[in-house]
Image: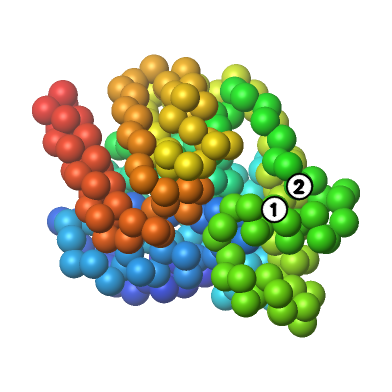
Amino acid sequence: MERYKKWFPFKDMNSLKDKKKHKVFCFHHAGGSASTYRPWMIYDTDIDIFSIELPGKATRMTEEYISNYEELIPQVAKAINEVSCGQDYTLYGHSMGAMIAFKTAYLLQNDYHNKPSSLIVAGRHAPIDDIKDRYQTYMEDDELVKELKRNNGTPSDILENEEILRVIIPAIKNDYKLNESLAYKDEVVDIPIVAHAGKEDYDASKKIMERWGLVTTNMFIIKEFEGDHFFLHQLGEDYYNYMLDNILGIREYNMGLS
């Protein structure tokens, strides 16, 4: 099991022995890392947060970055299949992470027969819609900075520091390359999907995110929150608690069906 620890750098793998807590595997937005969800890991609740680090990111920066979904997803799915230990679990993804979570859920369902009990997607259009990011990696770096400012998820002192930008821009561009590699292949999951949208996130509004309901044959729930693209961080523990209610509610529903 320890060989999979690199995927979950902030997790004590001994916690896998605690079968009372529902596991939640979290995927970050473009430009983020496993540390994005570290604040969630301090809350004492009935779920166990596993914040995922992708190759080439932060704690794995010495590894080669994988900029293609077809290469990345099988590795992610294998790691989650191993550490889920046959227990119920949830996949959570924000923005770019929502697409990684969906692709991973599909593989876990069909290749491993170990589908998550729920899939929560935030701030991202459904995979059936080919909506391009305003920034594309063939553009100049200043266009990426404009995109980061528009999304309101990067502190202004970082965006105004040229030395820091020279360090972080290549890594963020890798995430956008990963996004550009997406190819939807008519995947549909038989997993409850919960979609979360920010009222001021116009690229992933509630109306846009309603189309996630078309990629599941199971339950679909959608909820709108105050805030923009990064509403989940702006709302802090209040959002976390709502997400917790979603997860545990669907878990109880699934147990009632079995």
Instruction: Please give left or right for residue 15 compared with residue 160 in the image.
Output: left
Drawn side of residue 216 relative to residue 56, left or right: left
Above or below, 131 relative to 22: above
The reply to whether the C-beta atoms of the residues labelled 2 and 1 are less than 8 Å apart is yes
Crowd class of label 2 (few under 14; some 14 to 19; many from 20; radius 10 Å): some
Residue 179, above or below 167: above
Instruction: Write down the residue under mark 2.
Output: 135
Q: Position of residue 163 (x, y in %)?
A: 77, 82
Residue 147's label in the rendered image is 1
The quarter of the rendered structure image containing the C terminus is top left
What's the residue type where badge 2 is placed?
Answer: Tyr
Image quadrant where one finds the N terminus: bottom left
Which quadrant holds residue 125? top right
At x 41%, y 73%, the residue is 10
Nearest the viewer among 96 and 210 is 210
Query: Residue at position x 34%, y 24% from top?
Result: 220
Q: Nearer the viewer, residue 112 or 5?
A: 5
Between the residue at mark 2 and the residue at mark 1, the CA separation in whole angstroms equals: 6 Å
At a point 35% along the width and 42% down the height, the residue shown is 225
Query: Within 10 angstroms of label 1, few (less than 14), some, or many (20 or more) residues?
Result: some
Residue 28 percent coordinates (x, y): 51, 56
Q: Residue 41's spot in the image, x, y percent?
A: 32, 67
Residue 168: which quarter of the image?
bottom right
* Mark 1 residue type: Glu
As drawn, the label of residue 238 is none
Residue in the foreground of this view, choosing between 227 and 195: 227
Element assignment for label 2: loop
> Which residue is rendered at x = 22% and y = 35% of the image?
250
